[in-house]
Image: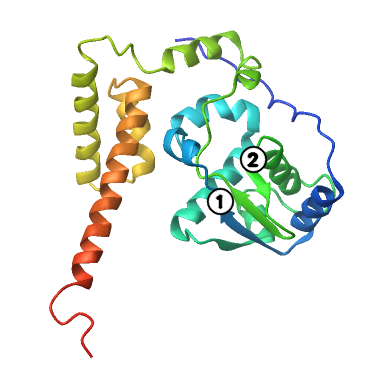
Amino acid sequence: MSVVPVPPAASPPVTRQSGFERAAMRSLSEADVVRIVAWPDAVIDRLGYDPRSLYVETFWLAILGPTSTWLLRRLVAGLEEHPSGFDLDATETALALGLGDRAGRHAPFRRAMARCVKFEAARHEGLGMLAVHRRLPPLPQRYLVRLPAALQERHRHWLVPSRRSPTLEEARRHARRLALGLAASGEEHQVFEAQLVRWGVHPALAHEATQWVWALHNRTDQATSAHAGQSPGAGRG
């Protein structure tokens, strides 16, 4: 299989920033600590792709660029641990990502945050605060056309197989069984999607099965916690 070169990251769309946006971006780049909160979206949260997924690594990477993609992965991982938000040490994060000094107008860390905002993976939520999407939507057409022809063709094949296929439900059940097996083996959920694809599962079904087993895991944890809270003796003074 030939290796398809990934083009340089797409240039952000040219937009005119308001005075607030310029001040907010400056506050983010100069702050020692940036407050990170979730940017909920009912549609994207349900249908989008985790920044650590194979889909994002394959298609969004060429648009966001590697630095912004890695920063976004780190921010989303932080929101998994702290759903209500957390404080990000800017210098520590820049060094952990291999970006060196975060200061200066053209510092890589500042550019990475700016690209996340430009491509609507994040937005300013006030001075020193950044709201982040926990998932990315399917690549919009205006960005898809910037990819090499081979990647555009691969994206077309990424779509869910025709729902007229009599084997679709069987393939979905098979993918979910494999995902359950990965969960039972103790694998981290971030690797499920890539592993399922390596096992020959269609990428779209691998993504769906990963989301399904993770949602099932969360529901089980919530039910266990609720049961523990109602156990004999709970709440008694």
Q: Residues within 10 Å of mark 2 (few under 14, many from 20)?
A: many
Residue shown at the point (54%, 14%) measured from the top left: 151
Residue 68 image label? 2
Q: Residue at x 32, y 25 (%)?
A: 205
Q: Whole-percent x and y of residue 39?
A: 56, 48
**Quadrant holding the N terminus:** top left
- Where is residue 55 shown, x and y percent of the image? 47, 28
Q: Is residue 194 left or right of residue 222?
A: right
Q: CA distance from mark 2 to mark 1?
A: 10 Å
> Looking at the picture, does residue 34 appear above or below residue 77?
below
C-beta proximity under 8 Å, tags 2 and 1: no
The answer to whether residue 107 of the structure is visible from this angle is yes
Residue with the mark numbered 1: 75
Q: Is residue 43 left or right of residue 64?
A: left
- Crowd class of label 1 (few under 14; some 14 to 19; many from 20; radius 10 Å): many
Query: In the rendered view, would you say 184 is above or below 207?
Result: below
Helix, strand or loop status at disc 2: helix
Q: Residue furthest left?
A: 232
